[in-house]
Image (tube, rainbow, N blue to C red):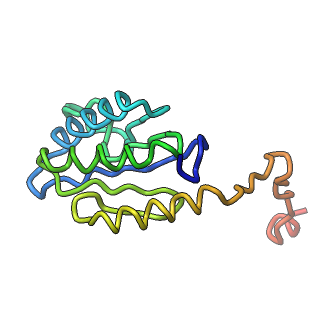
Amino acid sequence: MDGMGSTMVEVQLEVIPQADSDAAELEELALELRALLLDLGVEGAELVSGGTAPQGAKSLLGIFTGGIVVTAAGTSLRGLLSLAETWVKSRPVRSVKATVNGHSIEVNSASRDDIRRVLARWEAAASQPQIQVPAEAIAAPEATETPASASQS
């Protein structure tokens, strides 16, 4: 077992299309990759859209960005990268960019050594405690009187 144990990790995947791909093709490819990720047994895989599609557009998701946010156990990251590497080689895409805690790798141009190095960075980053501030600890800014409103009194 690797150093990440069963800690859940969020992985941002970005499908990088060929130059001549359109939005509908990109969305179809990402839906296919998402289905394979779910078959792999990840906890979750959600497509990321960047807004609302224009009326009459083919996209089901709005303006699709090519992104998939994957929630997976740390122990499944090697399998996730292996799946992405195999998938890229048989699809009309340039690569899949995977990012965990700010550390990224483009699967397709990456060597086995590159993949090993980024996995080590992901493991190290995931083992660092995450600081979470409770919402009630963040004070709302107090209303202050502006000089313009003060002079109107």
Q: Quadrant of residue 49?
A: top left
Identify the residue at the far left of this view: 20
Q: Residue at x 71, y 57 (%)?
A: 129
Q: Nearer the viewer, residue 78 or 153?
A: 78
> Residue at left 27%, top 65%?
110
User: Please, is residue 70 above or below residue 141 in the view?
Assistant: above
Viewer-proximal residue among 126 and 64: 126
Q: Position of residue 52 (x, y in %)?
A: 35, 39
* Residue 57: quadrant of the picture: top left
The spot of residue 58 in percent (x, y) is 19, 32
The correct choice, above or below, for 59 with respect to 117 in the image is above
Q: Where is residue 40 drawn, in percent x and y?
A: 37, 32
How many numbered discs? 0
The residue at the far right in this view is: 153
Q: Is residue 152 left or right of residue 27?
A: right
Give me the residue at 31% from left, 48% from top: 82
Front residue of this view, candidates 141 and 12: 12
Position of 47 with respect to 148 (left or right) is: left
Residue in the picture at 21% in, 46% down: 86
Location of the C terminus by quadrant is: bottom right
- The x, y position of residue 80, in whole percent, is 37, 44
Left or right: 89 in relation to 97: left
Give whichever of 112, 85 is nearer the camera: 112
